Amino acid sequence: MKKFWLHVLKILLPVFIFFLVLEIAIRKIPNDYQLKKAYLEKNAAKINTLVLGSSHSFYGINPKYFSKHTFNAAYVSQTLDLDEALLQIYKEKFSNLETVIIPISYASLFETLETDFEKWRLKNYILYYGFENKYRFTDNFETLNHDILLNIKKTVKFYVFDKSFITSSNLGWGTNFRSKSNQKFEGEFTAKKHTVNSFNLFDANLKSLHKIIELCQKKKVKILFITTPTHASYYKNVNKMQLLKTTNTINELVQKNPNCQYINLLDSKKFIATDFHDADHLNELGAKKLSLFLDKKINSQ
């Protein structure tokens, strides 16, 4: 029996060492979460305007065009519960924070990353931001969230071919959606993908919004809710009931909380086809236009 376990150990030990080395190697590859956390740790006290939210604000709001110190802490598939958690973590360090920009997209009130097909992204908040793991054991590891071949390829690309996996500017804005890229306005498909089957996550998201509002009120911070622009092929195909529940909810919150304001640009004619990367994301031209518009709004308050 002893020989059997020694034999098993001889087989498993190299496998364990391989995965341990791979795990360490991947975690040492610079990524956007590390960049954002490092910036917040060092500069939170300097930030006047903080951008939260998902890819719509990550790519659509560029701090470069704001007159006051602005940082974009948004990221792909980042939901309201994660926005709330980020604010909670750094609330004592945001000593000069004046405004928080929170995007309210068509699906924002009806989704969480935990229930999304991209829930593997949760491990990034646990590993790199230090969030408490309330989700899955596998979220404690890089190597248990992707196919092993993908992990090996990523490691080789960085350590052998020096490929960067940073897609954010120094101020947190997403740099990948450029106007030179081919535009694909598959708005009907995307709108249907964002249309939910039920509103069962609505209460949880509303609770997150209430906590965000309460936190900001205590800090005397203003909140600017923004529904970012979309292409006509998108907004013409949204579910009217889902959209109405979204806009009514935010308008009610604004009416009850004087520190809140809402700007709905879903079908804004200020943005033309060349401002979009795809049906629901702006490119760098659209991001500049939106950022300058928001900066003017904030400064006029």
Image (spheres, helix red, strand yellow):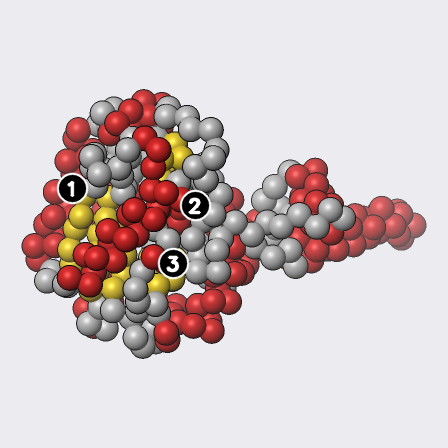
Amino acid found under the numbered disc labelled 2: Val
- Residue drawn at the location 39% of the way across and 71% of the way down: 44
Residue 25 x, y percent position in the rendering: 70, 55
Amino acid found under the numbered disc labelled 3: Lys
- Location of mark 2 (residue): 76
- Location of mark 1 (residue): 247
**Which quadrant of the rendered structure holds the C terminus?**
bottom left
Q: Are marks 2 and 3 in contact (CB under 8 Å)?
A: no
In this rendered view, identify the residue nearer to me: 179 or 173.
179
Counting other residues with Cα less than 10 Å from the Cα at mark 2, is it few (<14), some (14-19), or many (20 or more)? some
Residue 87 x, y percent position in the rendering: 34, 64
Label 3: which secondary element? helix
Q: Are marks 2 and 1 in contact (CB under 8 Å)?
A: no
Counting other residues with Cα less than 10 Å from the Cα at mark 1, is it few (<14), some (14-19), or many (20 or more)? some
- Residue drawn at the location 28% of the way across and 33% of the way down: 272
In this rendered view, identify the residue nearer to me: 191 or 61.
61
Q: Can residue 169 be seen in this view?
A: yes
- Residue drawn at the location 51% of the way across and 67% of the way down: 38
Q: How far apart are marks 1 and 3 (CA)?
A: 29 Å
Q: Distance between the residues labelled 2 and 1?
A: 22 Å
Amino acid found under the numbered disc labelled 1: Thr
- Location of mark 3 (residue): 64
